[in-house]
Image (tube, rainbow, N blue to C red):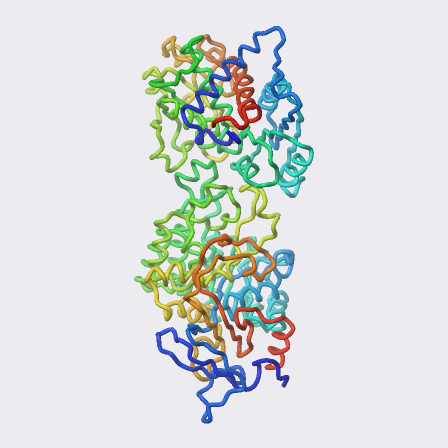
Amino acid sequence: MTHRDGAAGVTRVAGATLPDGRTADLWVEGGRFVEAPAGGTADRVIDAAGLLALPGLVDLHTHLREPGFEQSETVLTGSMAAAAGGFTAVFAMANTMPVADTAGVVEQVQSLGERHGYATVRPIGAVTVGLAGERLAEIGAMASSRAQVRVFSDDGMCVHDPLLMRRALEYVATFDGVVAQHAQEPRLTVGAQMNEGELSARLGLAGWPAVAEESIIARDVLLAEHVGARLHVCHLSTAGSVEVVRWAKARGIRVTAEATPHHLLLTEDLVAGYDPRFKVNPPLRRDEDVHALRAGLADGTIDIVATDHAPHPTEAKECAWAEAANGMVGLESALPVVQAALVDTGLLGWADIARVLSTTPAAIGRLAGYDRPLAAGSPANLVLVDPTSVSEFTRDRLHGRSVNSPYLGRELPGRVVHVLHGGVPTVADGELRPADEVAAAATGRR
Amino acid sequence: MRHLLSTADLAREEAIVLLDTAEDMADVADREVKKLPTLRGRTVVNLFFEDSTRTRVSFEVAAKRLSADVINFAAKGSSVSKGESLKDTAQTLAAMGADAVVIRHSASGAAQVLAGSGWIDAAVVNAGDGTHEHPTQALLDAFTIRRRLHGAGSRGRDLDGVTVTIVGDVLHSRVARSNLWLLTALGASVRFVAPATLLPIGIGAWPVETLHDLDVAIDDAPDVLMMLRIQTERMHAAFFPNEREYAREWGLDDARLGRLPATTMVMHPGPMNRGLEISSAAADSAASTVLEQVANGVSIRMSVLYHLLAATGEAS
């Protein structure tokens, strides 16, 4: 076993503030949290006084772009961005080139993540071949592959054919998988550019009506009920969607839902300047929608926050609005945005944040090791945050390959100071650890 | 005025100044030598990502009457995959020393993106961006209305109390949007008449009345009836059933023309679909301002270029 910084020996995380407000030491050895050793001696001490300890964050919705779009992001750069944001696990969406619709592609993505070590990379498999929405992808092969895929999604595209959606729900239920639906009625959103309403009318941009999302969610929860499967709804963006999911949950339907940080903070008003940094799908919505999403998270209707981290090269955003790509990078800004939108507004406490950004997304994705956060015996996935820090979000906070962040120049609270992924430090004193050290430590630990 | 991107940015006084200067420019057209030396040595680029010979020629004539050098840059097929991006084109024009860029683009907001990009320092004139705005069209329409109403006494006048009914595909019309903001700023009251499918969602708070019955609108005898061009491909997207029904329900046919008072002027931004949104008799009638609109377009564009390039440093 190599003896790189912190990857071996006993680490004491001294004086951290736990999500419930208590202050405690956390002990790490062999990649796991352990009980305080009898002598109380440590090979390494992380001073966590004044820092908040959260379980390593889990993102159920990330675009890592590899294979095929390495000019935007790679598994390495995306997992560096993840680590910088406090994430220790990310689920990589299937819309790569080739699409992750075979065992070969998902195994490749899985092993790239393992090799780099910044975060656990869990591939998501496509529901349909090539995301084309015409026939089922080799879901069973991906599920039984070395990557053990449990989440399936055509994200970017909606599984709009109701029969195909029904079959997918039935099929993945047999091995406890879940379909994560990108809810967008394609016929209602032909050429859509932004939220449909007064502003889209004024700006002359084709509207993306709320009903295009809500009608698909309504259909899918009824399908999930009918076949007894579980459904996950990606990036809820409208007040009406929250209502539909609330109704479905009250009815006992096995549905989970996510909201993105940007839909919890930003509104369509930002589109008025036609700056493509604010172009995203689903689009930024009204202030009422933002508040409905926050309320949905507060009352448990929405289960998790997921980033929909969507890197794009500069040229895809330096153009006219209609020609620009949809999407925003979000891994590095997720926790600050969630703090601003949910914690600093008093809607959620830090224990809730640990739930919506770690425990529950891991549970939905059937990712082991996150069910007993920070507890002795659990893998040492940890992020230490300084929630009192407030700073301008700048480009040097971004560690992926792309810089299409809507938050550049905006004041945001909170800063990630330390991150342990399975005991391996990926961020130390606010700095991302070098790739070779992280990879060596991660490999050595295995 | 640094750029002209939208009529929503124009205050009443600014708009009247632009219209008054256009009156002066119109006088130039009556001279033997139809040319002013005002913009000698300045370069105006017509950057057209979308075909529009009429608008391009109108800007070209306007710039040449002001003695500017004119470069026509047709960049059709604008998508990044097909050719040069907006950014590259803009930087190319900046390197060539363009003083003003007149841009026509199929994407809403393209003119604003160009003006705010930092890629080029020139004055930007929006010559039509997607379904957003077409400010010089609205200015020439307001100018035409004012001239018809007040003739030689137009200078300094606004459009207080004038009733304007705009008929047709408001949803996709940059002309309708620009006219609404400008005409209401000038004091006119505007009505949209269209099937519900061709009106944008959410315009309840706009300063406009909407209705779905052209005959009611005709019987209300507006001062101005503006017919918008309908694109026949719209019917394939189920905005209306077919051309026949559109013409019957929303077209200015001879019978409706006959019910209009003689004082109502009939406008159309062109090019017209005769027999669809407007009958030939209506287009060619004394009520029609179609050719005046074309002539006035040159005066308005001279005025805009003058205020952007020659009047730099002055107030507004």
Above/below status of B89 relative to B67: below
Find residue B230 and report its horizontal and vertical position in percent: 49, 26
x, y percent for residue A274: 50, 42
Quadrant assignment for the C terminus of chain A:
bottom right
Q: Where does residue A152 sit, x and y in percent of width and height? A: 51, 63
Q: Tally the marks.
A: 0
**Can residue A260 be seen in the rendering of this structure?**
yes
| Residue A422 horizontal/vertical position (percent) | 53, 78
- Going by the picture, which residue comes out furthest to the bottom? A39
- Where does the N terminus of chain A fall, quadrant-wise? bottom right
Q: Is residue B310 above or below residue B116?
A: above
The answer, for residue B240, to whether it is visible in the render is: no
Q: Quadrant of residue A147?
A: bottom right
Of A359 and A261, the residue lying toward us: A261
Q: Vertically, is B214 above or below A215? A: above
Q: Nearer the viewer, residue B3 or A244?
A: B3
The residue positioned farthest toward the left in the image shown: A250
Q: Is A219 placed above or below A434 here?
A: above
Quick check: B61 left or right of B190? right
